[in-house]
Amino acid sequence: MLARHLNPIVAIATAPGRGAVGIIRISGKDIGLIVQKLCGRDLQPRQATYLPFLDEQGQVIDQGLALYFPEPHSFTGEDVLEMQAHGGPVVLQLLLARCLQAAAETDEATGLQRLAGLRVAQPGEFSERAFLNDKIDLAQAEAIADLIDASTEIAARSAARSLSGEFSNEVQALLDKLVHLRMLVEATLDFPEEDIDFLKQADASGQLQRLQSTLVNVMERATQGAILREGIKVVIAGQPNAGKSSLLNALAGAELAIVTPIAGTTRDKVSQLIQIDGVPLHVVDTAGLRDSHMPDVDEVEKIGISRAWEEIKSADAVLFLHDLTRQKTPADPNVAATYRLGDEVIQQALADKLPSTTPIIDVWNKSDSAPTDVCAAVTASARVSVVISAKTGAGLQDLRQQLLTVVGWQSAPEGVFMARERHVQALHEVASDLMRAGEHISAMQPALDLLAEDLRQAQRALSQITGEFTPDDLLGEIFSKFCIGK
């Protein structure tokens, strides 16, 4: 532990602003003297006591509940005092200042400071202390922040599962099997003169296959959890007046973007967070795409088109919107031909600028106004497509389900736990290591030293999820994103 981890810490543990209740939390070693000074008495462990909180002159700052948790039976594993007062910002700041002041005062009986070195906690430092004192592992610590930040019910329940240790238990079970297999391999390396073939006798190949099968199951649920946490960035793209803003409004259920018949109405991106089956989606409406060198494209629209492509490049999925009413125009065939050509140019640009893994859904809008034969023709397209009417809402549910499908979401998955992108990456590293191990173990003359190294690397990658072998700079980055009082 670093020197700063030895200092006692204090912070306001509730969100900024006004509220009915606000909490001040202190954590450290041997905080009994400051508990007596702040509360005017000793407190019974884990029992709420109603009392006044006094300032230096003995004047009442507020009245509330005080709870004392002696180590190791506390969230951080240290002595913890929580003072629950009224949630006004001024009241809480007065109590925080009083804690720091009382800690620096000299105790009459001992002649020492009541709580030397007490300082305001850094973001996430209470959770960091809990991790360092083995009260929770790193995946559980991250689940605390995920539970606080959850934007949907499914996300909150999944984060609660991770916080309770479900994800960690899955990882630990994988680790136990991995370590056992590694022991077999290293035993064979250590005792080459023995006649016993440890690997065949213990069915090492079968153990590896079962380990890989279990890993696939964990990876699937972790990937779902990462989608729940991160959400999905969906960008609506297409030519001017295809109905992009109308589609955003229809998906959000509110008039967020201005809709007019005038081409180029949307000049900048408009974003909205929505939910589909509990999955958060960051939907972005963009400026209409067309050749920015056309004489009727002004400077503002050029900037809008440039920003639209920037959003498209960072999308998890793209809704490429087409106007059905302009696919076939008997009165002026040139209009339809020009529009189709514009769609083809955009389609090629999407293929050139996006990774092959980014799904593109062709959305054919204005089915309420388009000829029936045109609607039938586009539904036969080989690409992923859906016919909708942003005006009437027809086809929107199909679009929602199509969108979840192409990004890899499984409907109502069982036992999903909250996970992060780093967890998914670590599991993929483990899968790669085990695949190489499988190649070595199935060889006619297994390279046992390489096999052992594959298993060691897999163990290290897996251990990073729960915090073992995790670099200090990564730990600092993770906890710095927490709330100050958590």
Image: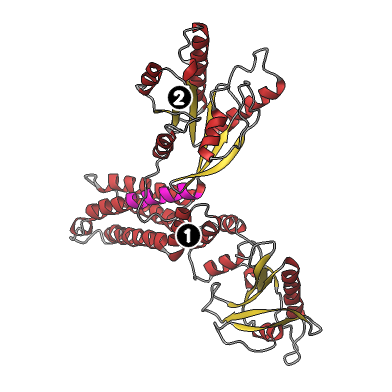
Q: Residue at x 53, y 40 (%)?
A: 253
Q: Which residue is mark 1?
A: 139
Q: Residue at x 69, y 61 (%)?
A: 17
- The amino acid pointed to by label 2 is Asp
Q: Quadrant of the C terminus?
A: bottom right
Of 225 and 126, which appears nearest the observer? 225
Q: Residue at x 57, y 65 (%)?
A: 128
Of 131 and 342, which appears nearest the observer? 342
Disc 1 crowd, CA 10 A, few/some/many (<14, 14-19, 20+): many
Q: Position of residue 93 (x, y in %)?
A: 74, 69
Tell me, yes or no, whether the highlighted magenta stretch contains residue 260: no
Q: Which residue is mark 2?
A: 368
Choose top left, top right, bottom left or bottom right for residue 405.
Answer: top left
Q: Position of residue 48 (x, y in %)?
A: 58, 82
Choose top left, top right, bottom left or bottom right for residue 29.
Answer: bottom right
In the image: residue 430, left or right of residue 302: left
- Magenta segment, prevailing SS (helix, strand or loop): helix
Q: Secondary structure at mark 2?
A: loop
Q: Which residues are magenta?
A: 216-229
Q: Is residue 15 visible?
A: yes
Disc 2 crowd, CA 10 A, few/some/many (<14, 14-19, 20+): some
- The amino acid pointed to by label 1 is Ala
Tell me, yes or no, whether the highlighted magenta stretch contains residue 217: yes
Q: Quadrant of the N terminus?
A: bottom right
